[in-house]
Image (cartoon, helix red, strand yellow):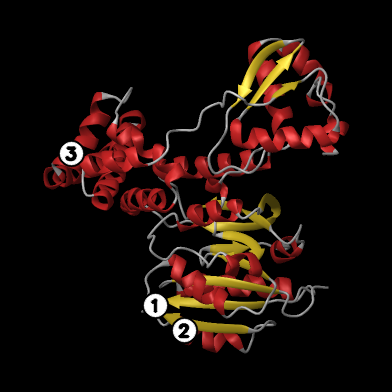
Amino acid sequence: MIAPGNLSVVIPTHNRKERVTGTLQALALEAGAGVEFEVIVVADACEDGTEAALDLLASRLPFPLRICSHAARNAAATRNLGASGARGATLVFLDDDMEPQPGLVRAHSDARGPRSVVMGYSKPVYAGRPTPWQQDARRWWEDSFREMASFGHRFTYRDFFSGNCSLPASLFHSLGGMDASLGRLEDYEFGWRMLGAGASFHFEPAALALHHDASDLDLWLARARHEGEADFRTGTRHPEVRYLLSHLAMPGSATRMTRLARKLAFALPARGDGVVKSLASLAGGLRRRGARGIYFRVVALLREYNYARGVALASGGRRSLLAWLQEGPLEPSMAGDAPVLDADAPPGPECFAGLLEAASRTGLRVRYAGVEIGVLPPRVGAEPLRSEHVRRWLHEFLTSNFVPEWAMENGEAGLPLDVQEVQAC
């Protein structure tokens, strides 16, 4: 049994009275099964009677419920407020549109260490018949979780989703909480700082919640604009990621329509907003007529415009963006002195651990039978290289480039890199 007060479940909410009360009732079933925790609901600028409904419900719940209120209209500030009053050693963050399934809190309670961060499985569900856009969004979410669950996945800061996650309260507070200056993607920015502080990310499918996503296309496009602003502000705080916005200033292989959308966003936003409004209306008509191919192309242009519009608003324009990009470092590339791994003759555990530590910063060159077969370039905002990352790369590389029959026949266990020796590192 979990010790009382060991876990604090923090739920931010905004005008979702029915949904958040349903979330609490689902948590009550788990408390009845012997799991002990407290819950803190933070109502952010609620105008639908959320606080009164929670006051009535509190006495009927089998766990302590505390209700906080403010009017920040900001997800990061709302989570920070809930965490500030939490008594538990572990924080569990749940969004108010998550319906926890049996075992979620218990799965989050199985801490893996003082800096262990766990992402739960938030399975997207939609009321009624989903639109093509919602179907596409569901595929994106499911693909993201499937990748996190796969062998050898290397976590990055963009794998941190705050809607269903847990982490040590000490880690959260030591980093100063989430950045309330961001209107979106505050979880990505916080993920960057956690990895920089030595946190380890894990995916736990048993921490399952049904994600009742009520987003529609209009809301998604509005969020794209906020994401553009957030990416610029994150790059201001962490210059290493600025290069990720270079495509907006240097079009490269972008299509003519994409380049036009970006030009309107930066140079002619008033005209661009009018064009986007017309395109949004067109997208609705295409969806009703079942023209899926054209519909998704139009939606992609709408998102491209809104994202670039957000970057333009935050940066002050294309010239300012160019100067900002030039002040940051270039995209990381292979260092000339990057370490070399001989896959057919791996070093001993101590040497291998040192090799991976250096390769996390400089990249890794991989040789087999004395011939360099490929490289693992350095990745910004990623966890340190581990043996399973290298083994996955080897498996995928051999399968796609050289001997797929051999790789399929032998599987991951048949790779030349000795798994027992490497995992001991």
The residue nearer to you, when weighing 318 against 239, is 239
Is the C terminus in the top left, top right, bottom left or bottom right quadrant? top right
Q: Secondary structure at mark 2?
A: helix
The residue nearer to you, when weighing 193 against 362, is 362
Front: mark 3 or 2: 3
CB within 8 Å, label 1 to label 2: yes
Q: Secondary structure at mark 3?
A: helix
Report the residue at 54% width, 59% height from top. Answer: 162
Residue 46 tag number: 1
The residue nearer to you, when weighing 221 against 415, is 415
Amino acid on which the number 2 mark rests in the picture: Glu
Residue that sits furthest to the front in the current view: 337
Lower sequence index among marks 3 and 2: 2
* In the image: residue 351, left or right of residue 358: right
Report the residue at 60% width, 51% height from top. Answer: 195
* In the image: residue 307, left or right of residue 402: left
Is the N terminus in the top left, top right, bottom left or bottom right quadrant? bottom right
Instruction: Report the Cα–Cα distance between label 3 and label 1.
Output: 36 Å
Report the residue at 64% width, 42% height from top. Answer: 148
Amino acid on which the number 1 mark rests in the picture: Cys
Please give the residue where the numbered disc 3 appears in the rendered image.
264
* In the image: residue 274, left or right of residue 62: left
Please give the residue where the numbered disc 2 appears in the rendered image.
51
How far across and how far down the image is residue 272, in percent? Answer: 16, 42
Q: Secondary structure at mark 1?
A: loop
How crowded pointer 1 is (Cα within 10 Å; few <14, some 14-19, many 20+) is rated as some
Image-quadrant location for residue 378 = top right
Amino acid on which the number 3 mark rests in the picture: Leu
Lower sequence index among marks 1 and 2: 1
Instruction: Report the Cα–Cα distance between label 1 and label 2.
Output: 8 Å
